[in-house]
Image: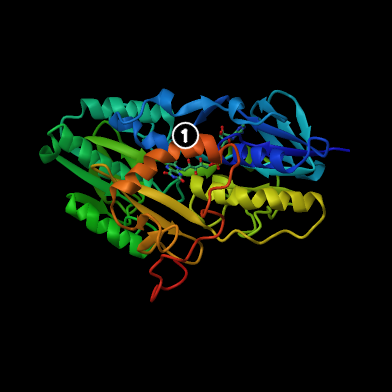
Amino acid sequence: MRKQIVILGGGTGGTMIANRLRKRLASSDADIHVVDRDNRHVYQPGLLFVPFGLADPDEIVRPRRRQLHRGIEFHEDEVESVVLDRDRVLLAGGHELAYDVLVVASGARLLPEETPGMTGPGWGERVSTFYDLEGAVRTRELLDRFDGGRLVVDITDMPIKCPVAPIEFVFLADWYLRERGIRDRTEIVLATPLDGCFTKPIASKHLTHLLGEKGIDVEVEFSAGEVDGIGGVLTSYDGRTIDFDLLVTVPLHGGAAFVGRSVGLGDALDFVPADPHTLQATARPNVFVLGDATDLPSSKAGSVTHFEAELLDRNIERALAGRELEAGFDGHANCFIETGFHKALLIDFNYETEPVPGRFPTALGPLPLLHESQLNHLGKLFFQWIYWHALLPGRDLPLVGPNMPTAGKQLAGVAEGG
Ligand SMILES: Cc1cc2nc3c(=O)[nH]c(=O)nc-3n(C[C@H](O)[C@H](O)[C@H](O)COP(=O)(O)OP(=O)(O)OC[C@H]3O[C@@H](n4cnc5c(N)ncnc54)[C@H](O)[C@@H]3O)c2cc1C
């Protein structure tokens, strides 16, 4: 009997793991099913560039189905719930999918309506987000119309996808407003619930210094509790206020709604608890999870999703053969941080080690870590090609895998636990 592998979500993680498994497992041994609600795969890192006219929507969207290798069955349907006790997925269209192995790759959901006032009057006019395609397009229109005043970029609360994206947004806004000649009559503020601009202290220090150089203010420990989109006021839970002329928000995130409807699968935020090293879900031994859907302390980033996928295909093969899983994922994350004016930083870290200066991927590597360079910027731009042509099809990248490289990093004296 052929095994049934069902993958929920056909985004970054779902597509990668489906293609990797199709290469690894013979069609006579396993059927692979991918479920997603639509046929539109968005290259999400490209959303950062849309508001500034540096990318157009049609450059960053491709049909999902076409990213999946032959021999993978795509179901364009909404996942209603998972019945763990019966090893079945219920789809909104009325179908049921039985599985031997389930992979949850349903990402994170934006929840702007959870913050009072955010999606009320002023939403799409004076308040916007760039975290989805429609929002990024709208933010571009609002920035085009923006003629100075106070631009506030706000992280409502953690966790969020790509924690560096809001920092990149303010760097690019600084560049964009200078190009338009209106930077001198604009204040840019980054409001964050964290006690620095980023989660990790050494990178936070470097980035705070750069933000200061560019005259960008950072309001720390600011958890947004309410938005007045007409009056232009953002209020924190502890009663502090920030006035704005334009608010670009990163809304609250949660896991997929079906996770909450599936008894025993998720946590209070609808993320899926899993073993941090094997990616096996806590709920059941035949359920695995990767990408933004997990509750893991790794970053919610495409790079993390890719490193997880490189281990998970092996672990699913092991699970099908009744063998012990490999505890091989170390939380490896790797992000280019666009800083404007054709430059970018690069950070590389894992569960244990925070981003530090040095070279990547080896001591003689071409890319400087935690240091602005044009090569890093070119790396960020070239990444889109790598995404469509190497990562999604399930190819490994040489020298960049699930385990963080240490050669090239200035680790002496760095405390672990970053
Ligand atoms: C603005 C922005 C910039 C970013 N920049 C970077 C970057 O520079 N580098 C980086 O590494 N990462 C970046 N990321 C993060 C990266 O895009 C995500 O971490 C990555 O896409 C996660 O992959 P995933 O498969 O977990 O989720 P996704 O790719 O989001 O896929 C989840 C899929 O599940 C589907 N789904 C959910 N619920 C259901 C349901 N009930 N029924 C059917 N289908 C469902 C969704 O439609 C979606 O297709 C960025 C993200 C954003 C928003």
Provide the secondary structure element on which disc 1 rests: loop
Q: Is residue 199 placed above or below 19 in the rendered structure?
A: below
Look at 76% across and 44% down and name the residue there. 101
349 relative position to 266: left or right: left
| Of 386 and 47, the residue lying toward us | 386
Image coordinates for residue 368, horizontal then vertical, percent: 34, 57
51 relative position to 212: left or right: right
Is disc 1 surrounded by few (<14), some (14 to 19) or many (20+) residues within 10 Å? some
Residue furthest bottom in the image: 413
| Of 73 and 212, the residue lying toward us | 73
Give the residue type at disc 1: Tyr
Image coordinates for residue 90, horizontal then vertical, percent: 73, 32
User: Residue 330: which quarter of the image?
Assistant: bottom right
Look at 76% across and 53% down and name the residue there. 318
Name the residue carrying label 1: 43
Look at 68% across and 38% down and name the residue there. 7
Q: Is residue 361 placed above or below 80 in the rendered structure?
A: below
Query: Is residue 24 visible from the viewing direction of this image?
Result: yes
397 relative position to 165: left or right: right
In which quadrant will I find the C terminus? bottom left
257 relative position to 323: left or right: left
